Image (spheres, grey):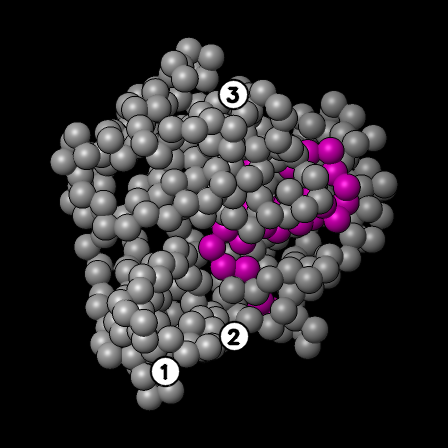
Amino acid sequence: MSIIVQKFGGTSVANSEKIRNAAKRAVAKYKQGHKVVVVASARGKQTDELVADAYELNPDPPKREMDQLLSTGEQQTVSLMAIAIQNMGYKALSFTGHQIQMITDSVHSKARIESIGSEIIHEKLDDGYIVIAAGFQGIDEKGNVTTLGRGGSDTSAVAIAAALKAKQCEIYTDVDGIYTTDPRKYSKAVKINQVSYDEMLELASLGAGVMHGRAIEFGKKYGVEIQVRSSTLDIEGTLITEEVPQMEGILVSGATVQSDLAKITIIGIPHSPGNAAKVFSALAGTKISVNDIIQTELDDNSANLSFTISKNDLADALKTIKAIKNEIQYRDLFIREDIAEVSAVGIGMRTHYGVADRMFKALAENKINIDSITTSEIRISCLVDKQQSDKALEVICDTFQLDKEPEERDM
């Protein structure tokens, strides 16, 4: 009997009716002959409400206590799911992250998974139970409750699927799959039937909110097929899987726009070995993730070093960089908060030329100025004025015909 892991996000378990519907999906898989593990998020806006309560009591709540608090949301959901399944006449047991030995490091609110004790899950699956595990949470080696941060339930689900060597991990959400871009910003977007891990990693890192990058990393590392599906519609979703040759025929698979960014430029950083390392080491020490990095030469003795970060990290990043000013002797800082990043992603870029040319020409023809450009093997990203970002996304989507199925596009 193969193992299927099903993950239900907050909107998919927001109330009793939705929990019952999710329970029906789990039971349906069980009746097909699969062993079923369900990973559930907190209901609806419950996590947001708990955060608001905490900040009302303390404007700077301890991160350890926040993890202890926020983990209760998932615990409620998994118990309710087990109750619903048992009422349908099937055996079900709920477990916290602690009970399944989801061991993480000790970084509260941004913990990373180190290991999963799959023995108890296998034992209960073999006994005929549907197992329901709390997503988003774990424990460190000292027994402290930890949470995995943004996208933590997705990460939990794929990690559990990897530990159990599951056939597939189904991610149920309020959308019916992954689209060529955000349909709210480009109404002509079409659903992608199949996408590679690498493409999905790029899309997730560039702001596509359906899946979190850490979950995709687990899938790629352990070969777990991930299917993103609708929690309300009984239709096929988007399969995230290994790259196959026919994917190279798709020039651009998707486009994104990311607006919650800030750009920091360190002006006049001396050409001394180790200066850049000191900057990014200091930022890493405060758990700040850096996105694109660009260095431009000023003269033989100095350069400008620019990088983008989440706006939420801007205050901490500035504090960190100012603290090492005397150490690296830069001249000044320049900050931009009025920017956005638009990107085109596709494995086809590896084997086809001219993608950058088409993209830059289209932006220029629409009078969209580019602040800076970064690339990878399968991605081209441009920083643009935030007020032009939606237009820039539309231009990219039209240029690469992301309103059409792949076989209908002109190369």
Horizontal relation, residue 196 to residue 379: left or right: right
Placement of 152 over or under 91, stated as above or below: below
Q: Secondary structure at mark 1?
A: helix
Q: Quadrant of residue 398?
A: top left
Label 3 Cα neighbours within 10 Å, binned few <14 / some 14-19 / many ≥20: some
User: Which label sits on residue 64?
Assistant: 2
Pointer 3 with pointer 1, Cβ within 8 A: no
Q: Earlier in the sequence, mark 3 or mark 1?
A: 3
Residue 207 position within the rendered picture, expressed as x and y whole percent measured from the top left: 39, 45
Q: Amino acid at mark 3?
A: Gly
Residue 21 position within the rendered picture, expressed as x and y whole percent measured from the top left: 54, 31
Placement of 113 over or under 77, stated as above or below: below
Q: Which residue is mark 1?
A: 328
Horizontal relation, residue 206 to residue 333: left or right: right
Q: Secondary structure at mark 3?
A: helix
User: Which label sits on residue 249?
Assistant: 3
Residue 315 position within the rendered picture, expressed as x and y whole percent measured from the top left: 30, 72
Residue 256 position within the rendered picture, expressed as x and y whole percent measured from the top left: 36, 38
Q: Earlier in the sequence, mark 3 or mark 2?
A: 2
Q: Earlier in the sequence, mark 2 or mark 1?
A: 2
- In the image, the segment drawn in magenta is 145-172
Disc 3/disc 2 C-alpha distance (Å): 48 Å
Label 2 Cα neighbours within 10 Å, binned few <14 / some 14-19 / many ≥20: some
Residue 159 in magenta stretch:
yes
Nearer to us in this view, 219 or 301: 301
